[in-house]
Image (spheres, rainbow, N blue to C red):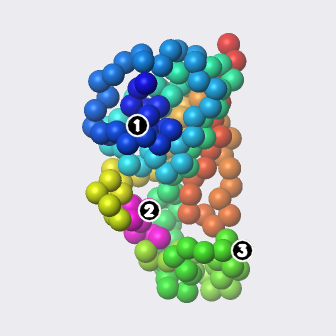
Amino acid sequence: MTNALRLAIGLKVDSNSFDEKDLVEENDVEEILMVEVLEHISWRKTSAILKECYRVLKPGGKLHIQVPDCGSMMRSFYEERVGEEIPHKGDEIIIKRLQEETGTLVHPDRFLFAFVGAQKHEYDYHRNIFWQERLEWFLDYAGFKYVKIEDKLGWKLKYNCFKPEK
């Protein structure tokens, strides 16, 4: 199994090593889930990982990606909308209401975590950042078609990606 696919299914691997090749056949996988994964891999490997996901997916196969939206975080900082009025995490409905009432979009910890990870253990740091245009460039380059999914709080980039039918 390739390292890209191992990461996608949640097995612990060394994200600096991508030496194994073709342990998963081309067009062999129906669906890959990469939620809060891609930002933990070196920015130098983003294209290779997404190309490998594309290679192993069957035509019509799906890739689900979620990463922190650093573009949204940068806009929040620039607009001075980072503040303690918003909880770091919690009920989405309550947070959305507080965002509307206070004008604050994100808690300072959530802002920081988007760029550097929560750092709760040795692997919990970010080696890559994404904003919409950057992630879409990588998805286009790998050959995916995609649909952006709205994140109600504006903290994440979420995409359903598809390998086109031949």
Q: Earlier in the sequence, mark 3 or mark 2?
A: 3
Mark pair 1, 2: CA separation: 17 Å
Q: Main secondary structure of the magenta part?
A: helix
Give the residue pinned by disc 2: 114
Task: Residue at 55%, 73% (x, y): give it.
Answer: 89
Residue 66, given in percent of the width and then of the height, sits at 55, 49
Please tell me how crowded label 1 is: few (under 14), some (14-19), or many (20+) other residues with Cα within 10 Å. some
Please tell me how crowded label 3 is: few (under 14), some (14-19), or many (20+) other residues with Cα within 10 Å. few
Residue 69, given in percent of the width and then of the height, sits at 51, 57
For the N terminus, the quadrant is: top left
Q: Is residue 162 above or below residue 153?
A: above
Residue 86, given in percent of the width and then of the height, sits at 56, 81
For the magenta stretch, what is the residue range? 110-118
Give the residue pinned by disc 3: 93
Type of amino acid under label 3? Ile
Q: Earlier in the sequence, mark 1 or mark 2?
A: 1
Residue 98, given in percent of the width and then of the height, sits at 65, 82
Residue 164 left/right relative to 137: right
Q: Is residue 139 above or below residue 22?
A: below
- Of 164 and 123, nearer the camera is 123
Question: Is residue 120 in the magenta section?
Answer: no
Residue 101 left/right relative to 57: right
Q: Earlier in the sequence, mark 3 or mark 1?
A: 1
